[in-house]
Amino acid sequence: MNIFAVVCFILHTGALGFLQVQWLPCKLNDEYVWKNDKGQTEIESIYRDAVLHFGNLRDSSLYPDTITFLVAASKVDMRKYVEGPVDQLQCEISRYSKGLSRVRWPSLGGTEHDVWFTCTLRHIAGLFNVTSYLRVTPATTMSPHQPDIHSWITLGDNEKLSASAVMVVLTRTPSVWVGLLKQQTLHCQFAVDHKTSHLTVEWYLMKHGQQTRLYSYSSSSGQTEGSGVAVDGIARGNASLTLPLTEMSSEGTYLCSVRVPPLNGSVTIALHVMESPQVSLTIEQGSFPRVWCEAMGYYPLDVEIELFKETSSGEHPKKLKNVIHRSHTKHKNGTFSLPAFVRLQPSPLEPGCGVYSCRVKHVSLQGLYIYKSITEPGCLTWINLILPGMMGVFVVIIIFIAVTKRRCLSICKRGTR
Ligand SMILES: *[C@@H]1O[C@H](CO)[C@@H](O)[C@H](O)[C@H]1NC(C)=O
Ligand SMILES: *[C@@H]1O[C@H](CO)[C@@H](O)[C@H](O)[C@H]1NC(C)=O
Ligand SMILES: *[C@@H]1O[C@H](CO)[C@@H](O)[C@H](O)[C@H]1NC(C)=O
Ligand SMILES: *[C@@H]1O[C@H](CO)[C@@H](O)[C@H](O)[C@H]1NC(C)=O
């Protein structure tokens, strides 16, 4: 697809309501499947340009040289769930394998030889991930004994496919950063083009290569296991999961699975725990005077502590070398603390007046940092001297005024007698 078409498209639709979008540029993640001479299946995937065109076959195609998916109007319109300017959207189309299953999609026109694709619309800043399941025609003929990947249809460079979206699964929380002991809901929503009695909703937590089932609901048996999803919401397509108060162990990838045979729909949500550090800056006196800066109660582990000193007042603080980091401590709640120190360095001009500061950077602070500063105790700077001096003068003036006023009053009173 050429750049002119993209620009033209953006000008056409801009940041407008998505119901008007006529087409979207996409990447097609295409797969070539073959059996090698040992009889093993090999798959190679290649990205190709494609276009998602909302309309039907009769529409004159604007892009003769591109693979086009003509998405006919259906009860499930993926455009309903996306928002924001078009240039913030990424569209990816992939082949969908239903394996050996030859279950017919129950809504109008489904056959056991249907060919499926998925189309994921993803917001680049992570506002949502919407995956729709597209049934395309023409269907192919699939062997009942082989997975459908062996009968993939071949797509020419200007192939036009009629597609209809029959199911959509989306999340508005594709990536979550949350503190400890917080209430967090993971958003998962779906829509299916017909009323189904064979719906399964499940949630899994995947971490360290293991998959734990947290919740399951089956509409055919009416049974639920686990908690966190409101069953009455499922009928309206709400499969959101409310987690127990977050702990370190809540971290991981969550999978919201919505199955309507033969489709296994899902979205994944990455949950990261994050706690900002508390920072303390102290001066330890004694035989080995030191300045301590400690970052406490933070997560994840990486933190940066820097110490600075103003050599003479008003001067730009200089970053100190020779900062010594103790080893970090891991607390029971999974957070870390890291103390660092530097030897107190005498200031030749103003003894005892060093101003030290500490700057702590951590991923939870989103590019900002925590900054604290401290003056050596017992420092007699001009501010320390002049300020009390000025206060003294001020008090004397107040007393003077009060006394004069009182005297005046007694004189005046005498005058009226
Ligand atoms: C869909 O999910 C079911 C149940 O977990 C599984 O048996 C089946 O293999 C899955 N199908 C595909 C194509 O992933
Ligand atoms: C969203 O969907 C895309 C495409 O399927 C996937 O690669 C990605 O991991 C998903 N999640 C996020 C947070 O983008
Ligand atoms: C979906 O269900 C959750 C509870 O599981 C609820 O907190 C949330 O508000 C519901 N969302 C909508 C859009 O109804
Ligand atoms: C975790 O534990 C540390 C040390 O006990 C404490 O300072 C910090 O506040 C705790 N963090 C949370 C979020 O409870």
Image (cartoon, grey):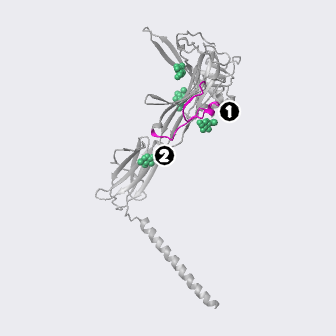
Q: Residue at x 42, y 55 (%)?
A: 373
The x and y percentages for residue 149 are: 53, 14
Q: Main secondary structure of the magenta part?
A: loop
Residue placed furthest toward the left: 287
Q: Amino acid at mark 2?
A: Leu
**Amino acid under disc 1:** Gly
- Label annotation for residue 26: none
Q: Residue furthest bottom?
A: 417
Kindly identify which numbered label has been placed on residue 368: 2
Instruction: Indicate the secondary structure of the residue bearing disc 1.
Output: loop
Relative to 60, is 239 on the left or the right? Answer: left
Q: Is residue 265 magenta?
A: no
First in residue order: circle 2 vs circle 1: 1
* Magenta segment: 220-248
Q: Is residue 129 above or below residue 108?
A: below
Gap in Å between the C-alphas at discs 2 and 1?
35 Å
Q: Quadrant of residue 104?
A: top right
Can you identify the residue that label 1 sits on? 17
At 60% across and 27% down in the image, what residue appears?
A: 222
Is 238 covered by the magenta stretch?
yes
- 210 and 142: which is toward the camera: 210
Measuring from the top left, give residue 285's x and y in whole percent. 33, 59
Decide: few, some or many residues near mark 1? Use Cα within 10 Å; few <14, some 14-19, many ≥20: some
Question: For residue 113, which quarter of the picture?
Answer: top right
Can residue 164 be seen at all in this image of the molecule?
yes
The residue shown at (45%, 70%) is 388
| Element class at badge 2 | loop
Question: Where residue 346 sits: x, y (%)?
Answer: 32, 58
Q: Quadrant of the N terminus?
A: top right
Note whether 381 is above or below 232 in the view shown: below
